[in-house]
Image (cartoon, rainbow, N blue to C red):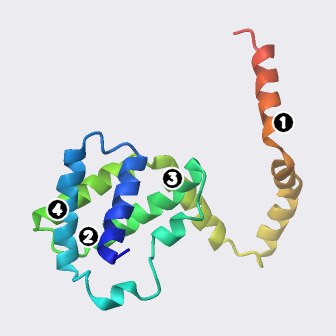
Amino acid sequence: MTCQTYCLFILSVIMIYFGRFGNSSILAHLQNDIDQLKADFNASHSDVADDGPIFTKKLMNWTERNEKRIILSQIVSMYLEMLNKTDNSKAHIRHISEELYTLRNSLPDGLQKLEDLKDLAKLQMTDLKIQRKAAHELFSVLQKLVETPTSLKRKRSQSQSRCKC
């Protein structure tokens, strides 16, 4: 797969996954915009294939729907960051950006989860106060880890049967 195909594939996966391609004319128009973007970046250059793909390789590790929302929200943000640093006077760049902004706005939970992961990565685990808090929460965290999906279903059904709302 060439870089040109990768770009289109990633954007297509993102937009199809979130239901933005109700009709194929949007995809066809975006393909033309993406072709122009690839020309802007000279995406047919030989170094594009070096070290393999950057996004599609990562997507393979994320299999669950909610997981994919997290990684796709980050990919969308990275595309927007890239496009914000280009010539926004070009219609194809504006159109792609608009579609990506629409997609990003449909991913609020994915974005929040991503922020949570970033916040966790910033924690200074050598800080004594952080260590105290972590020790205090350890049992609760372990409880969450050992809960099985069947026990979660049972809890949910038990609570529904108790509530006579």
Residue bearing mark 2: 84
Where in the figure is residue 18, as x and y percent of width and height? 41, 46
Instruction: Judge left or right: residue 131 versus residue 54.
Output: right
**61 w.r.t. 28: above or below:** below
Please tell me whether mark 4 or mark 1 is closer to you in this view: 4
Nearer to me, 14 or 159? 14
Query: Which residue is nearer to you in this view: 8 or 153?
Result: 8
3 or 1: tag closer to the N-terminus: 3
The image shows residue 60 at horizontal and vertical percentages of 55, 64
Q: Which residue is mark 3?
A: 69
Secondary structure found at label 4: helix
Q: Secondary structure at mark 2?
A: helix
Instruction: Return the residue at label 1.
Output: 151
Of the numbered discs 4 and 3, the one sitting upstream in the chain is 4
Residue type for callout 1: Ser
Badge 3: residue crowd in 10 Å (few <14, some 14–19, many ≥20) = many
Q: Tell me: 101 left or right of 65.
A: left
How far apart marks 2 and 3 lie (CA) works out to 22 Å
- According to the picture, the residue beneath numbered tag 4 turns out to be 32
- Specify which label sits upstream in the sequence, 2 or 3: 3
